[in-house]
């Protein structure tokens, strides 16, 4: 029996007695009317949030500087919205000024690199909208960056991001390549770029910014001058030995990046909390399709009918990932922190449509238990987690 299976069984038996611990005041499960991704009527399992006390307004979280929230609409490119937002905050922190960056410029080149790998692996690589937070770092290192106003990804007067038709055409072309064994890299990239140019517009080769002309690489290197190599990523999985660097085991890690620091859950959580308390914002990724997260409430918590806070630990975190009730389905930008009544609360800037359904458009409030149980990875400047990295280096001796 594997170590993971042993831990899962241990957790199962450990949780059995907890059924008698719930009081009459614990949250109750309810069903709410909701629409599916395609707009059809449906219902979702949720809870009554009216009794949940949380810090508000936004200002009590002392949020770091950040650009206003932007809707990602019907694209699945939250990773770019979240990590680009992080880097905009970093520009301000590092004294580079307040500059809004194009999310879609990064998305465009990410598709190009996905197609390149698809050809190189003869079809054995994912070409979908999703990706990892650190993909933004890689694409900026390779292709540069542009201001938001210089490339919107919305040609011809379009106002809503929608990649569905574009993706369908790309996949049809890639399947044609696979069927006919046409593994010609540059031709494939050129043809896919023609498809993307129709739906997203061609990214600029050069542009004007504050009276100067730059290429995207010149703008990234000379104007932004971000220390891109200084951003580090963390996970917490029993799948790997702790205090090692490994791969984030999700489909969106399509290039099999091995640079994630795998640390125990408590260190993972304290890394996020410590960073924001020092003024370093954090890009986070995890699962948000939960009864304890509901857009109109602005909140994300773990309800007691799901799991009591005392049972949230390394094993329950792993169990949710193992049985796929925790998936890497969304990326967000954590920008503030506030403690209240013994609970940690985090202010989240969110590009998903659900973030515009509540009273604080573009923002959510995540309680600490939700971060511990449902967040699977985070990225931050290394100085925000220097104690965690020092501990990592110590564990290597």
Image (tube, rainbow, N blue to C red):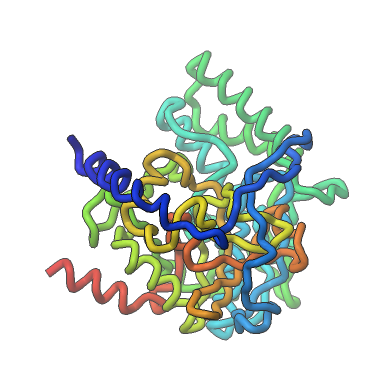
The residue lying at 54 percent from left, 21 percent from top is 177
Nearer the observer, 100 or 302 = 302
**Left or right of 119: which side holds 316?**
left
Image position, residue 393 (x, y; %): 21, 71
Q: Is residue 369 visible?
A: yes
Image position, residue 165 (x, y; %): 73, 32
The residue lying at 74 percent from left, 43 percent from top is 34
Image position, residue 170 (x, y; %): 63, 30
Q: Is residue 204 visible?
A: no
Image position, residue 138 (x, y; %): 47, 56
The residue lying at 70 percent from left, 59 percent from top is 355
Nearer the observer, 190 or 254 = 254
Image position of 88 with respect to 369: above or below: below
Residue at the farthest left position: 397
Quick one: quadrant of the C terminus? Answer: bottom left
**Left or right of 71: which side holds 9?**
left
Q: Which quadrant of the figure has residue 274?
A: bottom left
**Left or right of 40: which side holds 128?**
left
The residue lying at 57 percent from left, 66 percent from top is 366
Nearer the observer, 187 or 131 = 131
Image position of 116 with respect to 245: above or below: above
């Amino acid at each position: 029996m594997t170590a993971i299976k042993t831990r899962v069984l241990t957790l199962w038996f450990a949780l059995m007695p907890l059924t008698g611990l719930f009081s009459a005041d614990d949250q109750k499960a309810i069903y709410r009317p909701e629409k599916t991704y395609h707009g059809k009527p449906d219902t979702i399992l949720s809870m009554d949030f009216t009794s949940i006390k949380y810090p508000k307004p936004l200002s009590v979280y002392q949020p770091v500087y950040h650009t206003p929230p932007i809707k990602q609409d019907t694209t699945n490119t939250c990773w770019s919205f979240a990590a680009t937002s992080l880097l905009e905050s970093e520009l301000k922190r590092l004294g580079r000024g307040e500059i809004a960056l194009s999310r879609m410029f990064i998305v465009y080149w990410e598709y190009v690199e996905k197609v390149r790998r698809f050809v190189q692996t003869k079809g054995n690589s994912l070409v979908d909208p999703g990706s990892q937070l650190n993909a933004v770092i890689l694409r900026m290192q390779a292709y540069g960056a542009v201001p938001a106003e210089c490339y919107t990804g919305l040609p011809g007067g379009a106002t809503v991001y929608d990649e569905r038709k574009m993706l369908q055409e790309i996949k049809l072309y890639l399947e044609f390549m696979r069927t006919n064994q046409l593994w010609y890299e540059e031709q494939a990239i050129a043809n896919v770029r023609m498809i993307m140019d129709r739906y997203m517009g061609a990214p600029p080769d050069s542009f004007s910014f504050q009276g100067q002309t730059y290429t995207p690489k010149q703008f990234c290197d000379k104007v932004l001058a971000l220390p891109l190599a200084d951003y580090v990523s963390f996970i917490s999985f029993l799948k790997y030995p702790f205090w090692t660097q490994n791969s984030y085991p999700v489909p969106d890690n399509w290039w099999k990046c091995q640079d994630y620091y795998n640390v125990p859950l408590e260190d993972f959580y304290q890394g996020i909390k410590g960073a924001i308390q020092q003024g370093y914002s954090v890009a986070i990724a995890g699962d948000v399709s939960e009864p304890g997260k509901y857009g109109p409430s602005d909140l994300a918590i773990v309800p007691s009918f799901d799991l009591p806070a005392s049972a949230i630990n390394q094993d329950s975190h792993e169990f949710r990932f193992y049985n796929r009730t925790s998936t890497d389905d969304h990326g967000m930008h954590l920008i503030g922190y506030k403690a209240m009544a013994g609970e940690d609360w985090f202010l989240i800037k969110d590009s998903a449509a659900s973030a515009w359904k509540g009273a604080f458009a573009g923002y959510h409030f995540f309680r600490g238990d939700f971060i511990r149980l449902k967040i699977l990875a985070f990225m931050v400047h290394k100085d925000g987690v220097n104690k965690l990295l020092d501990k990592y280096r110590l564990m290597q001796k």
